[in-house]
Amino acid sequence: MTGHVLKLDLHNQHIAFLERDNYALGGDISPSLLGLKQLTHLDLSWNNFELLGIPTFIGSLARLEYLNLSAAQFAGTIPHEIGNITGLQYLDLGASYNTAEFHTPDITQIGSLAIDDVEWISHLTSLKYLDLSGVDLKNAINWAEVMSKLPSLSVLRMYYCGLVSVPASIPVINFTSLTELILFGNKFNSELPEWLFRITSLVTLDMSFNNFQGVLPQREIPATIGNLTRLHSLDLSDNEIGGEIHKNIGNKTSLRGLYLRRTGIIGEIPSSIGNLQNLQTINSKENNISSSVPASIQKPLHLKHLSVSSNKISGSIPECIWSSSHLDVINLSNNNLSGAIPSLMGSTYLVSMHLNNNHFFGELPSNLKNSNNLVVLDLGENELSGLIPMWLGESLSSLKVLRLRSNKFGGHIPPQLSHLASLQVLDLAHNNFSGAIPPFLGNLSSMVATTQKMSEPLY
C-alpha cells in the first residue's frame, strides 16, 4: 500500500508558542520514507526536530512536487541533494516568522539553517514557490543570478537571511513569472538596484529594513517605478532612499498599498497620486514631505489606512482624504496642517484618528459622533476651542484613548464622559476648563482594572 501514497501531511496544526511542542513530532526521520515511491507532497512543518539536520535522502524523493519543512527546528546546512528533485514546484524551508511581530528594524535574527552555495537551487527549474526566510544566506553572493534561472518562479521570500549583496545589474532579467518578492530585513547596505523596477510581473515588492541608500543612478524613487503596472503593494520603508516621489507613481493604477515610512523622501506630493483610485493604504510617516496635498486631486481616494505623521505637510485636510468613506485609520500627527477639522469627517469605519500636534482650530465636528467604532481619538496640541460636546460620551462608547490636551477647550467637563466604560487614557490637561473636578472620573473602571502591561503601548 505504501507505494501508492501520494500525500503525507504531518504538519503541526498547534502553532501557538505555548502549545506547539505538546503536539510536535520529533526525532530522526527514517529512510523508510523512501518506500513511498509515488509521494508528491510532504509537509513536516511546525514540528520540532530539535536542531537535527535535514536528511540528505530527502533528495531521493524524485516525484516530490511539494516540500514544506518550515519552522520545524531543523539546523545545519541544507543538503544540496534537494536540487535533485527537479519536478519540485513548492519549497518552503523558512523559519516562518510571524511577520506582524517581527517586521521591525530591531529584529535581525537568522535561523539555524544555512545554505553555503545556492547554485543547486538553479536545478529546480519547475519551482513556482520558494521560501528561505530566516535561512543564513550571508555567503550567497550570486543569489539573484541563480533565482533568475527559475523561469516559473512566482513567489520568492528571503527575509531575515543576512544577505549582504545585491548586484547593481543583471545581464538578463528572467523573472518573467515573479509576482511576489519579499526581501525585508537583510543587510544590503548598498544602492537599491533599478533592475528590480523592471520586473514587470511583480504584484508585491517588499525591500524594507535593508539600509539601502538611494536608487541607481538617481538616488530617488525612480521613474522606472511606473513600469510596474501590476503592482499591488510596494514597501521600501526604513531605507535611506531620499529624493522625491516621481510623478510616474501615478501610472501604477493597480496599487493598493504604498509603504515609504522612514525613507528620507523630501519635496512635494505628486498630483499624479490622485490617479491611484485602488489605493487603500499609504504609510509615509517620519519623512520630510513639505508640501500641501495638491488641490488638483479632485476625486476622493478610497483609502482605509492613511499614516503620514511626522512630516512637514501644510495646508488643510483636503476633500480627497476626508471623503474617504471607508477610512479606518488616519494619522496626520506632527505636521503643519491647519484650518478646521472638516465637518463631514467621521464614519462608522473609523477606528483610530490622530491629528495631534498640528494647528487645527474651531470646534469638534458633530459628524464625528457617527464614528461609533472609534477606539483612539488624539487631537492634542492644536488650537481647538469650544465645549467638549455631550455626544462625545454618549456616542463614542468604544473609546479607549481620548486625548485633547493643550488646546483651548473651555466650560465644564461634561458628565457624559462617564459613559466611556472602556476608556483607559483620558488626557484633558492644558485647556481652559472651569468648575470642579468631576467626581465621575473615579468611576472609569477600565483605567484601574486594566491588565495591560505598562510596557505595551495603548495606542
Image: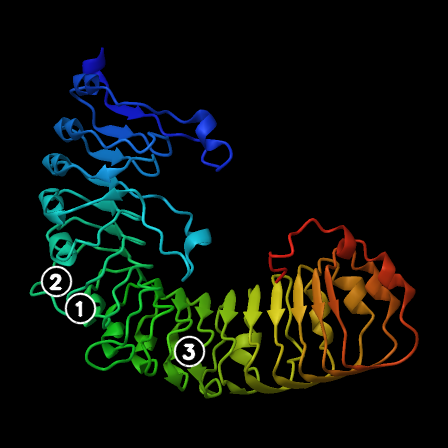
Horizontal side, residue 398 vs residue 162: left or right: right
Residue that mark 3 sits on: 274
- Asked whether residue 272 appears in the rendered view, the answer is yes
Looking at the image, which is closer to me, 255 or 267? 267
Looking at this view, is 122 or 4 the one in front?
A: 122
Does the image show residue 374? no
Q: Which residue is mark 1?
A: 195
Q: Identify the image quadrant of the N terminus.
A: top left
Residue denoted by label 2 = 173
In this view, the residue in front, 50 or 396, is: 50
Report x, y in % for residue 417.
82, 65
Please rate how many residues cluster around mark 2, counting C-alpha atoms within 10 Å: few if below 14, some from 14 to 19, many from 20. Answer: some
The residue under label 2 is which amino acid type? Ile
Q: Residues within 10 Å of mark 1 (few under 14, many from 20)?
A: some
Residue 442 sits in which quadrant?
bottom right
Q: Earlier in the sequence, mark 3 or mark 2?
A: 2
**Disc 1 and disc 2 in contact, CB within 8 angstroms:** yes
Looking at the image, residue 314 lies above or below residue 181: below
Mark 3 to mark 1 CA distance (whole Å): 26 Å
What count of labels does the image hold?
3
Residues at marks 3 and 2, CA–CA distance in whole angstroms: 31 Å
User: Residue 454: image x %, image y %?
Assistant: 65, 56
